[in-house]
Structures are given as structure tokens and as C-alpha cells.
Image (tube, rainbow, N blue to C red):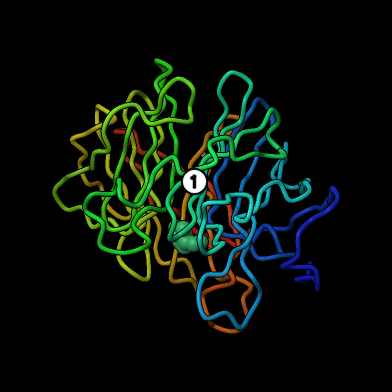
Amino acid sequence: GLISVQAQEEMDSIYHFTTQGNPIFTHKYTADPAALVLGDTLWLFTGHDFKGGQKGYNLKDWCVFSTTDLKNWTEYPTPLRAKDFSWDERGQAYAAHTVEKDGKYYWYISTNTSGIGVAVSDRPEGPYKDVLGTQLVKREDCFASKHSWTCIDPAAFIDDDGQAWLFWGNGVCYYAKLKDNMIELDGPVKKIDFEGFEFTEAPWIHKYKKKYYLTYATGFPEKIAYAMADNIEGPYEYKGILNEIAGNSNTNHQSIVEFKGDWYFIYHNGGIQTDGSSYSRSVCIDKLYYNRDGTIKRIVMTTE
Ligand code: FUB
């Protein structure tokens, strides 16, 4: 498939298509994938880069896709836009993550400069609504803030005991508990601290055999690194690099899920951008394998 003329416009209807290897989406540029597995369906929520000639990350809306076999996909009408958040100053649809709780879908989004919001829907494909009408996390809540973009990249995690957590940050990895209602923080904003941590952005929490895995982007251009802990709040032990710089892209942003018995590493690269700018990215999926001791093997990036 070729990048279509419509590539940076909103979707107003349902689109069915078949993919052939990585990058998986070639009709538009997608970034910051966040996967949600519900039964036999993998839902993928992504950002939506503009094509070519951009001077910075330029994303106005988010996209939602579903598949049951990682080959045949459905894309739904544009479910959420930066402009749906009235409090957002710059209209930048940065990285986001959707989770399900009690039949509702909570889409935690970041806006680059204005903090983190949450939009809610009764269905994974939306439409989603900004239920708070204000930020869930304000920039001021990020106490060690160095940059205007410190308050980005939310990733939610619901533990086996039902407690939901939100992780986010750039430069500092912040986290907080979420209340049962999923739309308010429960208690103070804290930060993850550990030896060897060079945290750039893009935290993601997953659990495997009772261990917590914190994966995140490190350095710049970014590689994905990871750390493991027995408790979600740490202490985390650094375990190394998981993914090398993903060709042609200064950023990388991962999502790790189990789907139909296999583990997947879903990320973005600059695989089909043509202007060398790093601002037109594409989502890719590769397999993830554990070693017997629970550490993760390096991701082999493929075009299959
Ligand atoms: O897509 C905009 C920003 O680039 C994201 O929020 C970061 O994680 C990086 O991928």
C-alpha cells in the first residue's frame, strides 16, 4: 500500500485492509502505538503523524484499529482529536494509552504542553469524550519539570488486585495511583528512581510471572530499555536495552502485550518516511521472547 493523499486527514468511515509485514500501516503515518487485548481482538490506538516536510512532531488526532489475526485490520472513524480537549493550548495529539475497566474505555492522552487528559467511551472504537473538561495531570503536578513537555506519555496499568496506576513523563518517570473511577489521581504524584536509569520518555508497564516490567525510551535518538521489579513502585533493576534505534526515527515508543499466547513488541520507526525528518513515523509489530529467568531477549526488528 502507498501513503494515500488522505494520509493526514481524518477518517470519516470504516476502512478494512490487509497488511504485509512492517510497517504494518502504509496508508498513513502512525506513531506511539498503545495496544489493548480484549479476548480474541487486538485493539491498537495510535497517534497520527503528518506526511513530509514537518519541522517538529505534528499530530492533530488519534487513530483506532482492530484485528484478530495481525493481518486483516479495521480502522474506525477518527475517535479523538487534540481539539476535543478545550484546555489544550497547542492542539498536539501526543502519546496516549487506552485501558478497559468494567466495560468502559479510558483513553489517557498527552498534549505536549498542557498536561494529561482522559477521555471515556462505552466502546473501544469510540467516540470518546473529555469527561473532566480539564487536565487529569497538570504540568505543575510534575514537580521536577525541566521542559514544557515533561508531562507527556501516559501509560495506565491495572494490577491483578484491581488497582489502576498511571505512569508518564519525559526526563523523569512519574507515577500515581488512579481512583476506582479511573478519572482522578488517588494520592500524590511520585517518581521512579533507580540506579542506571536514563529515562527519556514513553514508560510502559506490563506484568509477566508476577514481575513488573518497566520499559521506556532511553537516550536520543531513542532505544527502548527495560527494568524489572517485584513491586510496581520499585525498586526497579535495570536490565538493559531491548530495542535498538528503530531505523530512520529519533523517537521510539513501545507497547508490550500478550495476544493469543504470544508476546508482541509494538513500536514505531521511520520505515516509509521520505524526507529524512523523523516526523513521519510508522507502527511496526515484532515478537517478544522471554528467557527462562524472566529477562527479555533483544527484539529482532523485521520487515515481515
Ligand atoms: O509523538 C510525539 C512524541 O514523540 C511522543 O509523545 C513521544 O513518546 C515521542 O514518540
Q: Percent x, y for residue 110?
A: 48, 51
User: The C terminus lies in which quarter of the figure?
Assistant: bottom right
Q: Percent x, y for residue 28?
A: 71, 65
Bin the neighbour count of mark 1 within 10 Å (Cα to Cα): few under 14, some 14-19, many 20 and up.
Answer: many
Q: Which residue is mark 1?
A: 255
Is disc 1 placed on a helix, strand or loop?
A: strand
On the question of residue 22 being in view, the answer is no
Asked if residue 54 is positioned above or below residue 24 in the image, the reply reads below
Which residue is painted at 63% across and 28% down in the image? 38
Which residue is painted at 27% across and 43% down in the image? 227
* Residue nearest the observer in this picture, 304 or 195: 195
* Residue nearest the observer in this picture, 87 or 163: 87
Report the side of 292 relative to 33 (left or right).
Answer: left
User: The N terminus lies in which quarter of the figure?
Assistant: bottom right
* Residue nearest the observer in this picture, 287 or 245: 245
Task: Examine the image and state in which quarter residue 179 appears.
Answer: top left
Identify the amino acid type marked 1.
Ser
Q: Percent x, y for residue 221?
A: 37, 71
Which residue is painted at 31% across and 59% down in the image? 200
Seen as rendered, the residue at the extreme left is 195
Asked if residue 209 is positioned above or below residue 224 in the image, the reply reads above
Task: Examine the image and state in which quarter residue 192 appears.
Answer: top left
